[in-house]
Amino acid sequence: MGVAGKHFPSHAPESGAQDTPAPQPGASDERVRRESWFGHLLGRPEFAAISGTVLVFAVFAISAGGSGMFELDGVMNWSQVAAYLGILSVGACLLMIAGEFDLSIGSMIGFAGMMVAIPTMYFHWPIALSILFAFVGCVALGALNGYLVMRTRLPSFIVTLAFLFILRGLTLALSIMFADRTIVSGVGDVAKADFVTNLLFHGTAFKGLFVALAHIGIGKMLDNGQPLVPGVPKVILWWLALVAVGAFVLARTRYGNWILAVG
């Protein structure tokens, strides 16, 4: 069975057919490239944050008119107000990057104030030692929050909401025990019970609390007449320092890498 004499069809392309040229790597459409860059910019979280900040400033600047919002004293005033929230946002930012949230942070602040005031005013601790005591106590409470979230598998929203009420109750109880009146948010003034007054410190209140803390977080620096930067509030410097620490932790430490990876 030979194959001689059989005709095999040729697979060569016809003379009129032309091969489609392969696309060149650098020949992409410039318009598509620009749209891709703009879409990438819109997708960046920094763009939304900066745009929102600029929009808020523009709205308040228009509302304020010529009342001196952007004069030096005005900038110092609203920067001081923003610094308090900015300090809180540093820790909240790390937590939110990790995909969690802490609702007890406001109540923790009030309880921390009590942890500073009671040792300072009634046990005559140095103010630095009282602040260290409050810092360690808040770290321990935060660690307990995290432990309960991990062990119970409950959402951090639920666990920290429970801690919010617990810490608020403790702050209220300590206010009644150690001070003449309470000024807890959402609760009317409550007079201290007579037996508590007679039993504990004879009704002495926290009259010197703000005086004891003033030299640390209240007041201004470089305010000696005609300085280069007149009257920088100390709380702004604390804010900038904590932002720098938070940025360093996220960008330069293994712990920061873990936070970013978990989130």
Image (cartoon, helix red, strand yellow):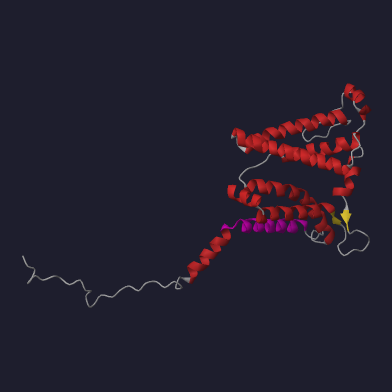
Residue 155 picture location, percent across and down: 60, 37
Helix, strand or loop: magenta stretch: helix
Q: Quadrant of residue 123?
A: top right
Q: Identify which residue, 232 or 241, lies in the foreground.
A: 241
Q: Residues in magenta?
A: 43-64
Q: Residue furthest left?
A: 1
Q: Is residue 57 magenta?
A: yes
Residue 187 visible in the displayed image = no
Residue at 73% x, 38% y: name it.
140
Residue at 74% x, 47% y: name it.
88
The relative height of residue 8 versus residue 74 in the rendered view (above or below) is below
Side of 32 where 165 appears, left or right? right
Side of 201 where 49 appears, left or right? left
Q: Is residue 179 magenta?
A: no
The relative height of residue 140 versus residue 28 in the rendered view (above or below) is above
Q: Quadrant of residue 127?
A: top right
Residue 258 picture location, percent across and down: 62, 49
Side of 54 where 193 appears, left or right? right
Q: Quadrant of residue 121?
A: top right
Residue at 49% x, 71% y: name it.
30
Q: Residue furthest front?
A: 1
Q: Identify which residue, 123 or 211, lies in the foreground.
A: 123
Residue at 73% x, 56% y: name it.
244
Residue 174 picture location, percent across and down: 82, 30
The relative height of residue 253 versus residue 160 in the rendered view (above or below) is below
